[in-house]
Amino acid sequence: MCKQRSFVVWAMGFALWMVVAGLLGVFAAPDAQAKEPYKIGAIFSVTGGASFLGEPEKKTAEMIAEWVNAEGGINGHPLELIIYDDETDPTKCNVAMKKLISQDQVPVIIGPSTSGTSMAVVGVAEKDQVPLIPCAAAKKTVLPVEERHWVFKVAGSDIHVSQRIFDHMKSKGISKVAVMTASDAFGASGREELLAFAPQYGIEIVADERYGPKDTDLTAQLTKIKGTAAQAVVNWSIGPTQVLAVKNWRALGMDNLPLYQSHGFGSRKNIELCGKDAEGVLCPLARVNIGRLLADDHAQKKVIMKYTEAYEKKYNEPISSFGGHAWDAMYIAVKALETVGPDRTKIRGFVENLTGFVGQHGVFKFSAVDHNGLSKDDLEMVVVKNGDWAIAR
Amino acid sequence: MDQITLTGQIVQYAITGLTVGSIYALVAIGFNIIYNVTEIINFAQGEFVMLGGLFMVFFSTVLGLPILPAFGLTIGVVVAIGIMMERFAIFPAKDASVLTTIIITIACSILLKGAAMYGWGKDPFALPPFTDCKPFLVLGAALFPQSMWVFGTTLVVVFVLTLFFKRTRFGRAMIASSDNPEAAQLMGIDVKTMVMVSFGLSAAIGAIAGIVITPISLMEYDRGALLGLKGFGAAVLGGLGHFPGAVIAGFVVGLMESFCAGLLSSGYKDAAALLVLLLALFLRPSGLFGSKEVLRMKRF
């Protein structure tokens, strides 16, 4: 008897709870779940070898998603940001991409972080016809444009960097240049563009030196350069060798040959490691790195300062140009959803015709023949002065 | 400034080659000490160099200690790591074959590299030079004071080690336990202690190499493998187990690299060094200075 009664009490309690829950649901539905969420898919290399890219990218994208939702979402639709970590592994990146397309059914995907992982998924974007906005630099992600219908990239390219360096050299009357590059993918790509564009600028490459990315000394290469007619040196590498290049260049007393570094040098950490030796070293940087140096009336000043201040406040670490890529990709996706809604084909069309979008890395002008939308003018030549960047004249 | 003359260039390549070669020589000596006592090739030798550099950065830059105490502490810590590696990884496998033990050292090197990445992160670190003065000019080539430190340290290490192995009872006991462990044991030499000491000594020499090279080349967690490889090349070229051979071979590899980078193409630099190694081994499999008789007696 007793058992039966308690069962009845339980059953009644459960029924009551169901009714209350149902009523709550009916009343709650109209305000919180007014409109179905808009989704943005993201793949970043948050861990693994390229975590220095993926980490700030993820943080930036999350920060923007919070802002958008705090301001009431996109046209009233809450924004749902789905981030997968590919662990810097092209295979895992590919799996994440397919999951975003078929399981999460997102209308647009931002990322991946590296050239390697991006190349592993551009084919999927083409086949499944999903707009993809990688944060990687390799030009092959958007070229040839006939085969990259659905892919748009937001990172500048080595072409722009080498053009910007040669522009600056020409303005200084330099015509004979020595090139030294690391023998890894980053250095090799830079070397290719430097050698390809030099003739167009009437610049003669008088030395073409390569070294291993883990080399401990570059004096041999620089001594050889010293023996040529070079008027300037370009070093194109990442990691410790770009610091070695500066130290050895200074120690060999080569101050009369200006040293240009690639955009890989654009971290304050490098200036710290070089110490006094870095004074006078030149490098072309995206403006996101130097927001505080820009004139107040510069088109990008406002958006870069907003990012710099908000990111530094929220995460208590300096911004990086990589996080800037995520900012650009994220806002392009948000803008597309706002204008055309969650339709893959319409989003693709919107991004391809997007011009005048002011982002962290420049003012983007996409077109049917240019899925990058940046140019050499989106880079600023900076020089190290008193242990900090200054805009080079 | 005027362009540098060919003589100046050649002097510069020689200076660079000898500086880098000194480090290869020190790494090669580290290989030899352990090899002489145990017949093991310790592939974590490059990691000792990396740890030496990074601990020196920690003690002198982060804790702000003066050079000498930092130098001593760094060596102490790295020696402790070397001895711990022997006690916890090599000693328990004392009945295993030489090859198995060598593979254990590879595991240790991966572990040390991973731990360093965890502790220091992936960024490179710099150290100020020991003496802060302008490079001297020799025939138009720049000679950095730190290069002299590297060079001098190598010579001192070689001199002290030679004395130790030739003249002291302890050093001779170490040599004896490698020549014939059983006979040495019967003569009252504690072979187990000798093996442990050999790891400690190698770690100390690796640490010294790391400390003196860091002001020139910076140091980061994954630098060890390549230095270890080049040092191994030098050790083999000089004849495994042969100390003066290791030093000379270290300089040869360093000079080959720097002259190839300067006079031919820097792209072929690593290939040149390895080509010399291969050629030498084809013509003299026991290395430049090793003897065939000794080689035949070794198990590996």
Image (spheres, grey):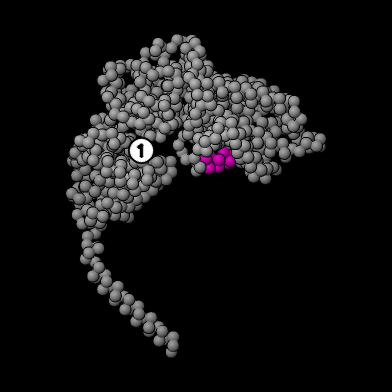
| Residue depicted at 58% across the width and 41% down the height | B107
* Picture layout, residue A233 above or below residue A272: above
| Residue depicted at 71% across the width and 27% down the height | B164
Of residues B83 and A134, the one nearer the viewer is: B83
| Residue depicted at 18% across the width and 49% down the height | A339
Q: Of helix, strand and loop, which one carries label 1?
A: helix
Q: Residue furthest bottom?
A: A1
- The image quadrant of residue A136 is top left
A50 displayed left or right of B204: left
- The amino acid type of the residue labelled 1 equals Ser
Q: Residue furthest right?
A: B187
Quick one: quadrant of the N terminus of chain B?
A: top left
Which region is colored magenta?
A: B106-116
Q: Is residue A111 magenta?
A: no
B206 displayed left or right of A295: right
* Picture layout, residue B171 above or below residue A355: above
The residue at which mark 1 appears reads as A115
- On the image, the x and y values in percent for residue A164 come to 28, 26
- On the image, the x and y values in percent for residue B189 come to 78, 36
- On the image, the x and y values in percent for residue A214 come to 47, 30
| Residue depicted at 33% across the width and 22% down the height | A195
Whether residue B69 is visible, yes or no, is yes
Q: Main secondary structure of the magenta part?
A: helix
User: The residue marked by circle 1 belongs to what chain?
Assistant: A
B35 displayed left or right of B4: right
